[in-house]
Amino acid sequence: MDGADFRTEFVRDPAALRSHPALVLNADFRPLSYYPLSLWPWQEAIKAAWLDRVDIVAEYDEVVRSPSTVIKIPSVVVLKDYVKPQKRVAFTRFNLFLRDEFCCQYCGSKGDLTFDHVVPRARGGVTSWENVVAACAPCNLAKGSKSLHRSGLTLRKPPRQPSSEELRNYGRRFPPNHLHESWVDYLYWDAELEA
């Protein structure tokens, strides 16, 4: 496909604009986040490079053109300035499921998850990291507003607030559906090697 065909295909197919995301790495060459993976649309990556905010370390084979410039689309960019990772982990449904590794904390199943208050709200339980767990619909229904002891269910592990590093490590176990080959070396370079 020549440059003109590629350019007009981008214009005709809006999905093509999203099909070449750039993996964004912090200045220490680690992704800003693993889950969701820190990605920018290719336009943002080119703009950041043009403004000298990032270095391009890998590129796609495709190019974009302006009247005076031909630019290879970046596939991996590194921030020039280090962004300090957040220490506090937001208490969100997604982060709760990630902490519990997307499985029911009562039976271990991985489908149709909701969340459950270990000490039911009707009995004074609060919505917090230490009292809410991922649960499948059948276990949640079986427990209802009963205490853990009365329900006959047991927890796989006690609920607690994860650190940002723990959540980042959990996120590595659940890679996104699409990983461009140029990203792989940057996603797992600091993972512990098996002996």
Image (tube, rainbow, N blue to C red):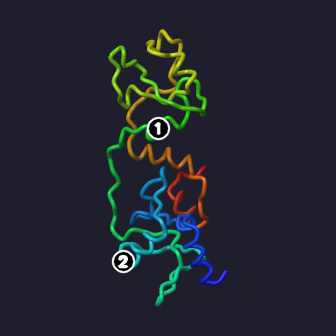
From the image, state whether disc 1 or disc 2 is nearer to you: 2
Instruction: State the residue in front, 28 or 70.
Output: 70
What's under tag 2, amino acid-wise? Asp
- Provide the residue designation for mark 1: 99
Question: What residue is rendered at 54% in x and 74% in y?
Answer: 59
- Provide the residue designation for mark 2: 52
For marks 1 and 2, the one nearer the N-term is 2
**Callout 1 crowding tier (Cα within 10 Å): few <14, some 14–19, many ≥20:** many
Return the mark for residue 22: none
Q: CA distance from mark 1 to mark 2?
A: 36 Å
Question: What residue is rendered at 60% in x and 57% in y?
Answer: 178
Residue closest to the far top: 150
Residue 185 position, x and y percent, is: 56, 63
SS type, badge 2: loop
State how many labels appear. Answer: 2
Residue 164 position, x and y percent, is: 39, 45
Residue 131 position, x and y percent, is: 39, 25
**Callout 2 crowding tier (Cα within 10 Å): few <14, some 14–19, many ≥20:** few
